Amino acid sequence: MQGQVVKKVVVAGGGTAGWMAAAALSRHLGSLLDITLVESDDIGTVGVGESTIPTARTFNQLLGIDEREFMRATMATFKLGILFEDWARLGDRYIHSFGQVGKSTWMAGFHHMWLEARAQGFGGDLGDYCYELKAAEGQRFATGPDATLNYAYHLDATLYGRFLRGMSEKAGVRRVEGKIRSVEQDPESGFIRALVMESGDHVEGDLFVDCTGFRGLLIEQTLKAGYDDWSQWLPTNSAVPLQTVSVGPAVPYTRAMAHTAGWQWRIPLQHRVGNGLVYCNDFMSDDEATAFLLGQVEGEALMTPRVIRYVTGRRRKTWEKNCVALGLASGFVEPLESTSIHLIMIGVLRLMQLFPFDGCSPALAERFNRLQDTEIEGIRDFIVLHYKLTERDDTPFWRHVRDMPVPDSLAHRIELFRDGAQAYQATGELFQVDSWLQVMLGQRLEPRSWHRMGRLMPPDQLRRALDDLKGNIGRAVERLPRHQDFIDQYVGRRVAEPA
Ligand code: FAD
């Protein structure tokens, strides 16, 4: 390829990140590139990461994936949001859904009208005005040309990797199995030249995508890109995953249940349930965590629990020299809002947009790094919000997160909402206003004031307008089939082995 400096792309690692990168690059730039993926069955993958957000659908569409085929291959279910239990206070429950809340105007968000109504003694719950939230609560779901629900998936991470691998290999990606022993660099520039395998083989490349997981074999162990540790804001550092047999119909939401030193997830798939405990080991031992989780799960365990240790934070540079880190190699902000797979997706799309055909330049790397930084910082603040707003003081962990200082960017958002019920989505940020709203109110952050738009209409008219909205949503939800019935019909079978 005359004039093209970067042609050979080597993806190091075959977890979700590696295969997502290989699938996207081969689908969209395959005819210009020569792509190799290196992975080690002996090392394996992290084996978790099963709850997604709606951008997963965008990614699948970009890859031309048929949804039914994907759902059968990954034993996926649909997800409309996350149910948070016991977060602000013991006994509290709220849903952060993927939906929009009510109808906003250019001047003020819908919630200002709702706050006005609530102050006048009517209006009900904010969630009554959100289609996705009510559908999640009622365990209803449908998709298709006429359905307008905004949704994501719960999927089996191992099967998803296998599915993407099949697509990638068909599109020409070469897979090399084996352990990377060392990384060879150009002595002058420090650019990576090749991965040296334990077999002695060299896998040479022009651009390397580091998807080796937490170890960051290329980006950190070789290029020393550095890591910003965020555990002062996100103190959990351990997780114990556990898969169990399903004991009831799959619900269309992830459950995030707060416990004494962190939280527990429950993710329903077609064939099993993914569970896990996230905790900080300063406040709970591994043995306590494992015993607690085993006592909490419903259904027979399908594996032996094992502890995963992590440090929340992000790589200081995710693009350094001729190496771009994706997935856990680029950082991890804990799984509370299921954002890691999104970060992989957005990273690989940005890499394709900024692809260094004529060589890796510092300017391209800096642009990529800035975009990734904005994205992950917004997500960090959103996750910290859940902890910071707790009112729980029943355990040392909850007192610690309630009293901890937070990033200035987040402190400002909290103040803004408390003072004037104002929430915003900054440029380049993932979470929309409705997400901030649902979590802030769900966590009992009470605004002292709000926009007076609601007073522009007489109380009766405001009440009628809200009742109409609520009624329309209620009727639309009643018309939806039950989530489990919809899945059975959509994938064409009841619980069975993956296709
Ligand atoms: P890994 O899965 O660790 O893959 C690393 C790859 O590198 C493997 O193929 C391995 O064999 C290879 N490798 C490493 N070293 C070598 C070597 N020397 N030679 C050859 N190959 C090597 N994300 C979400 O979006 N939603 C969730 O609900 C969610 N839940 C999570 C829960 C927990 C507890 C954790 C820890 C993470 C969670 N994540 C979640 C994040 C998600 O799991 C990861 O983003 C995703 O799995 C991608 O991982 P990875 O591919 O970067 O790393």
Image (tube, grey):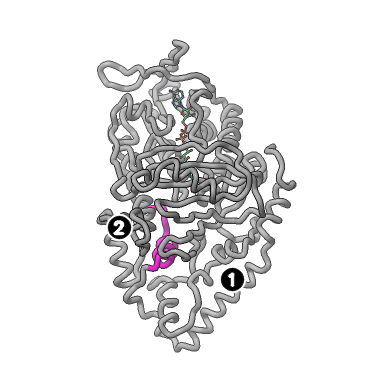
Badge 1 density bin: few <14, some 14–19, many ≥20, Cα 10 Å: many
Name the foreground residue: 392 vs 221: 392
User: Where, by quadrant of the figure, is residue 108 drawn?
Assistant: bottom left
User: Where, by quadrant of the figure, is residue 194 drawn?
Assistant: top left
Image location (x, y in percent) of residue 256: 49, 54
* Kind of element beneath mark 1: helix
Magenta highlight: main SS: helix
Instruction: Tell me the residue that label 2 is attached to.
Output: 410
Q: Nearer the viewer, mark 2 or mark 1?
A: 2
Name the foreground residue: 420 vs 250: 250
Instruction: Tell me the residue that label 1 is attached to.
Output: 473
Image location (x, y in percent) of residue 386: 39, 58
Name the foreground residue: 109 vs 449: 449
Q: Does the magenta stretch include residue 433?
A: yes
Q: Which amino acid does label 1 sit on?
A: Ile
Relative side of 184 to 96, left or right: left
| Identity of the residue drawn at 58% across and 29% down | 171
Q: What residue type is labelled 2?
A: Leu
Image location (x, y in percent) of residue 186: 30, 17
Relative side of 125 to 332, left or right: right
In the picture shown, does residue 31 fall above or below 94?
A: above
User: Where, by quadrant of the figure, is residue 117 drawn?
Assistant: bottom left
In the picture shown, does residue 63 fall above or below 433?
A: above
Name the foreground residue: 373 vs 134: 134
Marks 2/1: CA distance? 32 Å
Q: What stretch is highlighted in magenta?
A: 429-444
Query: Quick check: can you spot residue 439?
Result: yes
